[in-house]
């Protein structure tokens, strides 16, 4: 909730917004009085986001934009006060025709529906948005027309550090739970912490936690020093998300049958970790970004 509202939306307004947009949104978003959501994915375009089909057409007489389309899997979608929305403003195929808009969620024509039945992240609203002749003034455009895809990609590069940091938290929680349980649970007359195969599970989690944390800190350090960080963010996000899934799964194994029951936290950790390898770019997409940086050849 926080990572999307502050990391993806608020920071993007701070980087690209006009003075008027900053005054309208930043105080409320940073105080937590308003929430933002990030509307990039559509029913037909996920990894290939530059190919999105939501359209914003300029209404000649008023200068307004009229937006039509749909957005899928939008975190905070039904709770948010503003959507950072990506829509096509001209017919140039691919990402060059995409622009960014700030659309208040009470704008007529915008409807939102919570998506139920998620594997994890059940404390958070994921929604589908439908835009049916949503009219916004020209001042809703964020950054220059046609720059929307670069704005989205720069937001996601930083967002990947937040996702990686969240994964470090999940993996650390898995380690803490596994260590505590291994010390308490007795089988064959001793706590299971005595058994080397259980120690192996805990050792694997511990190494994953350290490696994920160090890769994440490296990104934070690069950002602090104003250095190029996008590939490092993809590496941290790729490793930390896969590590969070492995760690939660290893912790569940330490808990035995009890790990499979909701009374203990490790099942929830595994369900919550699972989405981390999917959103803000799947693991496959991170590998393509890293591969492109290493080889200089783009797979996209
Ligand atoms: C809980 C949740 C919250 C989300 N929150 C948001 C949000 O707030 N805002 C938002 O805009 N989106 C959000 N998303 C969407 C998310 O970013 C997408 O689901 C993700 O980018 C993948 O897109 P897709 O689901 O369409 O999968 P697809 O792109 O259809 O991919 C399907 C499979 O094909 C693989 N694949 C695709 N292209 C390639 C390729 N070129 N090479 C190799 N493999 C490839 C993928 O890695 C994946 O394994 C969220 C998703 C979920 C589940």
Image (tube, grey):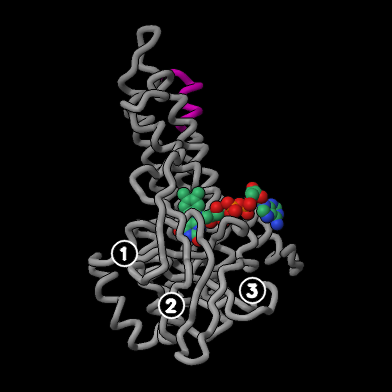
- Residue 150 figure quarter: bottom right
- Residue 120 figure quarter: top left
Q: Position of residue 67 (x, y in %)?
A: 50, 74
Between the residue at mark 1 and the residue at mark 3, the CA separation in whole angstroms equals 27 Å
Q: Is residue 284 above or below residue 51?
A: above
Q: Position of residue 226 (x, y in %)?
A: 47, 77
Q: Is residue 95 left or right of residue 168?
A: right
Q: Which residue is mark 1?
A: 35
Where disc 3 sits, the SS reads: helix
Between the residue at mark 2 and the residue at mark 1, the CA separation in whole angstroms equals 21 Å
Q: Position of residue 168 (x, y in %)?
A: 43, 48
Mark 3–mark 2 CB contact (< 8 Å): no
Could you classify mark 1 by the number of other residues whose Cα lies within 10 Å: few (under 14), some (14-19), or many (20 or more)? many
Could you classify mark 3 by the number of other residues whose Cα lies within 10 Å: few (under 14), some (14-19), or many (20 or more)? some
Where disc 1 sits, the SS reads: loop
Residue 124 visible in this rendered orientation of the protein: yes
Q: Which residue is mark 3?
A: 95
């Amino acid at each position: 909730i926080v990572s999307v509202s502050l990391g993806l939306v608020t920071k993007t307004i701070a980087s690209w917004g006009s003075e008027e947009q900053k005054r309208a949104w930043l105080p409320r978003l940073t105080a937590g009085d308003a929430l933002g959501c990030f509307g990039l994915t559509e029913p037909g375009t996920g990894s290939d986001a530059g190919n999105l089909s939501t359209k914003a057409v300029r209404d000649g007489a008023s200068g307004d934009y009229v937006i039509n389309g749909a957005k899928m899997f939008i975190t905070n979608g039904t709770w948010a006060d503003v959507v950072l929305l990506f829509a096509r403003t001209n017919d140039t195929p691919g990402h060059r025709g995409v622009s960014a808009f700030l659309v208040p969620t009470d704008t007529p024509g915008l409807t939102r529906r919570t998506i139920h039945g998620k594997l994890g992240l059940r404390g958070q609203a994921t929604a589908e948005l439908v835009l049916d002749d949503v009219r916004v003034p020209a001042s809703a455009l964020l950054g220059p027309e046609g720059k929307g895809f670069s704005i989205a990609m720069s937001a996601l590069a930083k967002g990947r550090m937040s996702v990686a940091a969240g994964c470090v938290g999940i993996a650390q929680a898995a380690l803490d739970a596994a260590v505590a349980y291994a010390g308490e649970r007795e089988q064959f007359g001793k706590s299971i912490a005595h058994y080397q195969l259980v120690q192996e599970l805990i050792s694997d989690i511990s190494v994953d936690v350290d490696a994920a944390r160090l890769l994440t800190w490296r990104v934070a350090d690069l950002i602090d020093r104003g250095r190029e960080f996008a590939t490092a963010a993809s590496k941290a996000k790729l490793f930390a998300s896969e590590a969070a899934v492995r760690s939660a799964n290893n912790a569940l194994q330490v808990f035995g049958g009890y790990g499979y029951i909701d009374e203990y936290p490790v099942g929830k950790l595994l369900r919550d970790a699972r989405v981390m390898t999917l959103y803000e770019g799947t693991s496959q997409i991170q590998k393509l970004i890293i591969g492109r940086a290493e080889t200089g050849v783009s797979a996209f």
